[in-house]
Amino acid sequence: MWVKGRIPCSSAELNIDIVLQCGQSFRWKRDLINKSWQGVFSNKLWILKQGSSEISYEVLSSDAECHQTKVEKEQICNEELVDYFQFNVPLVPLYDAWSQADEKFKKLALRYQGVRMLRQDPVENVFSFICSSNNNIQRISSMVEHLCSSYGKQIAVYNGQKVYSFPELSSLMDESVERNLRTLGFGYRAKYIQKAAEIIEQRGGRSWLVNLRNVPYVEAKASLVSIPGIGEKVADCICLMSLDKTCAIPVDTHVFQIAKTYLPALAEKKSVTHRIYSEISIFFQELYGPYAGWAHTVLFSADLRHLKDPPEKAPKRGKNQQNNTVQKRKKNTRI
């Protein structure tokens, strides 16, 4: 059964076309014909559309919720969507503050308005970003879908395609998981996924991860980097995108290059050491304040090639030129 609803929202508070393809979540697919987005969270299939003053949605969930009334389902969906997009955080005042603090941000603000952080399930966020190591957005998305179709539960069928939930921790712990994921092209990440699931379950499972929302940022990050496959950058992604640590600054190659335009002393540096990582994080935290991680995501999004050159607006190219463009985009979307 489909549930339909809408939530008032201006484009200044949410630009769905940027937020859902800037490397935060990897389960969203764009429908250019219907101008909508299809994705999965909260064990539901969501179809989202952005209007001039609202976000409309259609949601399909499993039969397990059939006992709820239509009004109850719509209320639950509204609450889940508000939580997912963190609509409780007004974005326009933050943009105003960041623009006053930084002229470079101010120049980007109009073109990249409405970029906010998703509040994702920590389990999905952890394993999605273990897949992100030395990878690009398109390939990460493919890996995450393989995880879901192999170890998740079917929650819907849409346009003839089966839709799956994200796997439970227990389904990723078995030793056979590593072997299977290697055959699916996960490489060395396969071992990290199996070991991480095992360790997280030993520490208390999903409840342990969710509880990291209630501890200080430094403590949460230290807990995460003790898990196989999670380094400093991935830990900051998880802190920012699912653990409510709004000050976290994930420093990857994009952010490193952006930081060089602010910190001339980094101009000759070729790689990010722990000291440089800390220097960059502290600089942006001091520049942007408590929501520095949100501001950083605006800068990050503006640096992604596929967001500078949207597919539906790109001129037609010859076959050879298309191939060259794909290779360049893969290089520029590595995270």
Image (cartoon, helix red, strand yellow):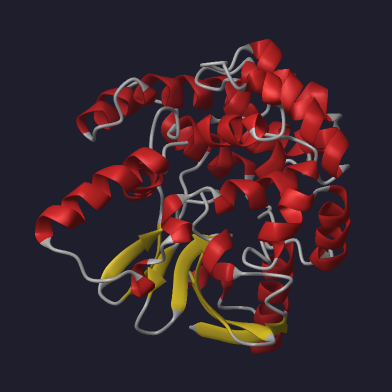
Observer able to see residue 150? no
Residue placed at 11% from the left, 53% from the top?
A: 320
Residue 11 in the image, given as x and y percentages of width and height: 67, 76
Q: Nearer the viewer, residue 282 or 20?
A: 282
Q: Relative to 246, does residue 105 appear above or below in the rendering?
A: below
Q: Quadrant of residue 290?
A: top right
Q: Nearer the viewer, residue 80 or 198?
A: 80
Residue placed at 82% from the left, 67% from the top?
A: 92
Relative to residue 68, is residue 127 drawn left or right?
Answer: left
Q: Relative to 30, does residue 124 appear above or below in the rendering?
A: above
Relative to residue 212, is residue 113 drawn left or right?
Answer: left
Q: Quadrant of residue 18?
A: bottom right
The outermost residue toward the left is 319
Residue 180 in the image, given as x and y percentages of width and height: 25, 30
Residue 281 in the image, given as x and y percentages of width and height: 74, 28
Residue 33 in the image, given as x and y percentages of width and height: 34, 83
Observer able to see residue 298? yes
- Number of labels in the image equals 0
Residue placed at 81% from the left, 22% from the top?
A: 219
Q: Nearer the viewer, residue 79 or 317?
A: 317
Q: Nearer the viewer, residue 302 or 201?
A: 302
Residue placed at 70% from the left, 75% from the top?
A: 78
